[in-house]
Image (tube, rainbow, N blue to C red):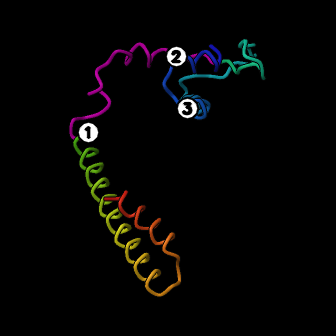
Amino acid sequence: MNTAQLREHTTVARGSTLHHLEKLVEWGLVVEEDGREYHGRGGRDARTWALTDRGEQFCADHLGAPLSEFVSPEDVAELNAEVTEAMERVSEIENDLAAVLEAVADIGESTGYISNETATGLRKKSQRRN
């Protein structure tokens, strides 16, 4: 199967398809074939790929397997906790940034270092963060 055909059947971002295919080569699951195929969209001919014996065995053993075979509920819970913590940190940083923008607007405007228009723009940005 060529790279263009593989892209049509996956949700992998176009720019990272080759990266993932090269990882599969490293793991011995696929091999790049010598020839290239015209894919009908102009540009260079597409690279072609085939499953290795190991890749065929992996597919036979694992395609259709439940996700729990690869990821444990504990792993999911840990990742969810990390995401929650990261979201809380982002929220705190956004609140801190809003306070800094307000302070810069107030100080800059009161000292005459920034215009009223610039101060108003900073205050609008700070309100978007709340």
What is the secondary structure assignment of the residue under circle 3?
helix
What is the secondary structure assignment of the residue under circle 1?
helix
| Foreground: disc 3 or disc 2 | 2
Q: Position of residue 66 (x, y in %)?
A: 28, 21
Question: Which is nearer the N-term, disc 3 or disc 2?
Answer: 2
**Mark 1 vs 3: CB contact within 8 A:** no
Density class for disc 3 (Cα within 10 Å; few <14, some 14-19, many ≥20) is few
| Magenta region, residue range | 49-74
Taking the magenta stretch, the answer to whether it contains residue 56 is: yes
Tell me what residue is drawn at x 52 percent, y 76 percent: 115
Residue placed under numbered mark 2 in the picture: 9
Work out whether 120 lies above or below 15: below
Density class for disc 1 (Cα within 10 Å; few <14, some 14-19, many ≥20) is few
What is the secondary structure assignment of the residue under circle 2?
loop
Residue placed under numbered mark 1 in the picture: 76
Does residue 32 appear to the left or right of 53 in the view shown?
Answer: right
Tell me what residue is drawn at x 39 percent, y 73 percent: 100
As drawn, which residue projects farthest toward the front?
Answer: 116
* Residue type pointed to by label 3: His
Q: Could you say which quadrant of the image residue 44 lies in?
A: top right
Question: Which is nearer the N-term, disc 1 or disc 2?
Answer: 2
Does residue 18 appear to the left or right of 111 in the view shown?
Answer: right
